[in-house]
Image: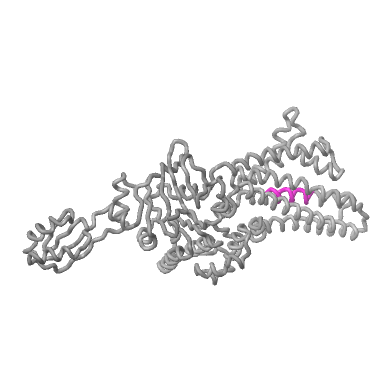
Amino acid sequence: MNHPIEFEGLVKQYGERKVINELSFTVPEGSVVGLLGPNGAGKSTAMRVLLGLQKPTAGHARILGSEAGGKGFRDAVRKVGSIIESPPLYKGATALQNLEIRVGAYGMSTRDADVRGILNQVGLAERVGDKVGNFSLGMRQRMGIALALVGDPSIVVLDEPTNGLDPQGTVEIRDLVRSLPARGATTLLCTHRLAEVEATCDYVVVLRLGELLAQGPIDEVIANATSSGYRIEVDASEVPNALRILGSMGLGELAAEGGVVTTTEHIENPADISRALAAESIFVRELHTERATLEQAFLKIVEEAGGV
Amino acid sequence: MSGEIAKLKYLALPRWTAGSVFAVALIVGAALLVFPPSKVEKYATIPAFALGTAFGIAAIVLAVWAASVEFSSGTLQRTLTAEPIRSRVLGSKLICVLVGTAIVGLGAAAASAGLSEIAASNAGVSLDNGDLAKQVFSQVPSGLAFAGIGFGFGLLTRSMGGGITLALALAFIADGIIGFIPGFEHIGFGRLTHDLTSGLSGQGDTANGLGAALFGTVVWVAMVMVPGWLRFTRGDLK
């Protein structure tokens, strides 16, 4: 699998202060990766180094195999659409003029870039002639995304793209981000909205104080960080027997309250639980798979590393 | 380059700045028409002085803006992802500033000379058109030098206010501060650009020859622009 975005031993230091420390991770092609971390984790700095706005103290940040100042970087970075921290807008210009400036910088014509199609995608087609300085925060976010989509980028880097959006706008932008892989774009998404990451991303990378704490597919990160198991309801009088049987099935730590037994581990086939209990005439009333949320996993990962 | 041209075209400050220079030319022309001067040479010296001052300030404002607009609007990331070679970004901006400044300067000089000629003929005064043209058009090269220091200070300060203040101080105040130092009386930026304009127009007192004034002006512009250029191309940007 190709990895259009790669960080390898990246260090960024301002004086004595390290804001990124030996950061290494890759973003698989066509995936949506969430970059998470508390404020000051180094997320935006990592993105700036990636785009060549800031120089690394040590290590490498590569886009499509090229790093800033190196061979092929110009062609590579021109395939990136980005918003870092706030939408990069000329507030005195209209939505269309902002896009025309962007298109001009790429040496494209507005027709080739399909600027009206892009404005339509982000729901700003009706406001094409309005100055973006008069836009609401949410509309500016949409405008920023429109700018990031100019030139049909193969990599999209978005920092808090739903900041200031209402629930409907959030859903629309979430759908848009989800549609990027189908357009052939690899996406690096930086946000504090963990529910949004869970709904949008395939992989997550967790940073704290410039250091990598966790990375991988969302389910794997959650499973590694939190104990998730089953909630099994049986007749309260059968609980001691149920605990004896379940204790030999590799379900981790068991706890009981009333007629409910909870486990901390999963097994390959949950039906084995019902079968084993039924063999001893204990009949399961309900069996739920308990799954921690990304938010719970994130908080635990950060807390174990020393907190925010 | 197209992106920089689009910024000049669509953003408000370049339009207002150019408009102000033309407005000054128009107002001075109207004033000459309504209040005809008693001395013939005033039909050339008044518009040349007004144009020179307004154009010089406008050139500084436009150049500082061009150099610092990405910092104030937070648009560097989009500019540098479209063109990551920072020297090219600055080169495009500088060319646009110098060409734009020259177009405005030449246009305003032409308008100013034309209005002065109309005012003079209206008052029944015969002007030496060659002399009039020399006086107004000779303001353009020093205006380009003002743009050069404005661009440099814009890059150094990354701020519209800071850049304009420093550029205006160098152009209009610094000579008075360093002029008392023996050997520095005639090599301040203001003196050199004045001598450049005087040398081209053939009018006024000069302390330096045309060649020396041009060389000294270029050295001043380079002294301001090179550190700004290096700061932009080598430093971290947000």
Q: Horizontal and vertical percent for residue A182?
A: 46, 65
Q: Residue B52 lies in magenta, yes or no?
A: yes
- Whether residue B73 can be seen here: no
Q: Horizontal and vertical percent for residue B155?
A: 62, 45
- Whether residue B1 can be seen here: yes
**Residue A229 or B199: which is nearer the viewer?**
A229
Q: Residue at x 77, y 41 (%)?
A: B193
Q: Residue at x 75, y 58 (%)?
A: B23
User: Viewed as shown, does residue B191 lie left or right of A18?
Assistant: right
In this picture, which residue range is highlighted in magenta? B49-60
Q: Horizontal and vertical percent for residue B226?
A: 65, 40
**Residue A272 placement: quadrant:** bottom left
Q: Horizontal and vertical percent for residue A64?
A: 50, 52
Q: Residue at x 89, y 57 (%)?
A: B120
Furthest-top residue in view? B182
**Residue A20 placement: quadrant:** top left
